[in-house]
Image (cartoon, helix red, strand yellow):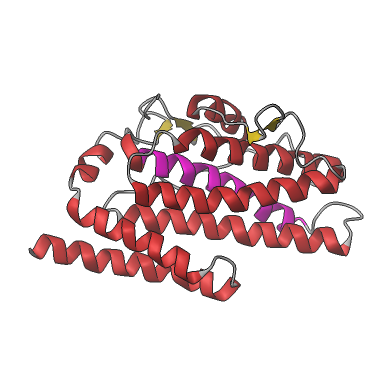
């Protein structure tokens, strides 16, 4: 009983931690976020197996294993959100690219705030589930020219498209409805990000055949292994992710 009480206290702290930035930035709707996180709290209190899952993470191999099962998928999403948040933070810290319009600056600042919220939310959600989030990853943006509009927006497009495809591909691997609810909420926002960036680059390309199957009208998806191969090109040595323990089907 005391074990459960301890977890409840920890979950409440995690919930408070994630709700503060949400309130400050007024982005995600409180009700949906609270309900989703509440589901995680209940799951975390009744599933001690999650602690065992994270004992399998090798933190000394130089590669960050996201773990297995549902929480492994949450950590996988957390890794991708960390990468996106770090990218947009770098864009804003670099004072955007040369000749960025006011509208573009506002959009990129909003995206930076959103991705930070997503990253913080997943961190808190993993803790609320009674598990251990992966470490803070170190990005490698050496291939990006932050003074160039084409380079910045091209990279943003790659990240947003990758994020949407990643959530779409991971959804079928999630067994806990609470986690699936979280993924569904976040991917809907990521899809709007992707559409916005695409239209900045070329108006009307938000439903291009490279991201939407024109026969079915459905957004394309990628497996965790496909996503990790791309994401790792933007992560430094020691921060590259290993998704080999995640469910395959």
Residue 23 horizontal/vertical position (percent): 52, 75
- Comparing 25 with 98, the one in front is 25
Q: Say which quadrant the C terminus sits in.
A: top left
Residue 229 horizontal/vertical position (percent): 56, 25
- Comparing 176 with 116, the one in front is 176
Q: Is residue 148 above or below residue 33?
A: above
- Residue at point 67%, 34% (across, down): 217
Quadrant of the image occupied by residue 7 = bottom left
Q: Is residue 222 above or below residue 15?
A: above
Quadrant of the image occupied by residue 107 = bottom right
Extreme-front residue of the structure: 216
- Residue at point 66%, 58% (across, down): 112
**Seen in the image, is 171 located left or right of residue 147?**
left
Q: Say which quadrant the N terminus sits in.
A: bottom left
Secondary structure predominantly adopted by residues drawn in magenta: helix
- Residue at point 73%, 53% (across, down): 91
Magenta range: 72-94
Asked if the magenta segment contains residue 17, the reply would be no
């Amino acid at each position: 009983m005391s074990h459960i009480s301890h977890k409840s206290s920890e979950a409440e702290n995690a919930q408070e931690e994630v709700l503060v930035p949400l309130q400050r930035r007024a982005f995600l709707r409180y009700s949906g976020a609270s309900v989703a996180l509440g589901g995680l709290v209940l799951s975390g209190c009744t599933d001690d197996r999650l602690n065992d899952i994270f004992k399998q993470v090798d933190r000394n191999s130089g590669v960050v294993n996201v773990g297995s099962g549902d929480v492994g998928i949450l950590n996988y999403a957390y890794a991708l959100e960390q990468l996106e948040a770090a990218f947009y933070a770098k864009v804003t810290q670099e004072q955007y690219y040369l000749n960025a319009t006011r509208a573009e600056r506002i959009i990129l600042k909003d995206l930076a705030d959103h991705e930070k919220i997503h990253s913080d939310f997943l961190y808190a959600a993993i803790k609320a589930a009674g598990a251990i989030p992966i470490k803070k990853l170190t990005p490698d943006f050496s291939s990006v020219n932050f003074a160039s509009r084409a380079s910045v927006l091209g990279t943003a497009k790659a990240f947003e498209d990758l994020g949407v495809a990643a959530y779409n591909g991971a959804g079928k691997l999630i067994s806990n409805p609470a986690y699936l609810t979280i993924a569904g909420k976040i991917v809907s926002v990521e899809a709007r990000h992707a559409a916005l960036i695409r239209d900045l680059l070329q108006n009307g390309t938000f439903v291009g055949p490279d991201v939407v199957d024109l026969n079915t009208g459905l957004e394309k998806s990628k497996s965790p292994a496909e996503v990790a191969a791309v994401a790792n090109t933007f992560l430094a040595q020691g921060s590259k992710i290993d998704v080999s323990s995640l469910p395959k089907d």
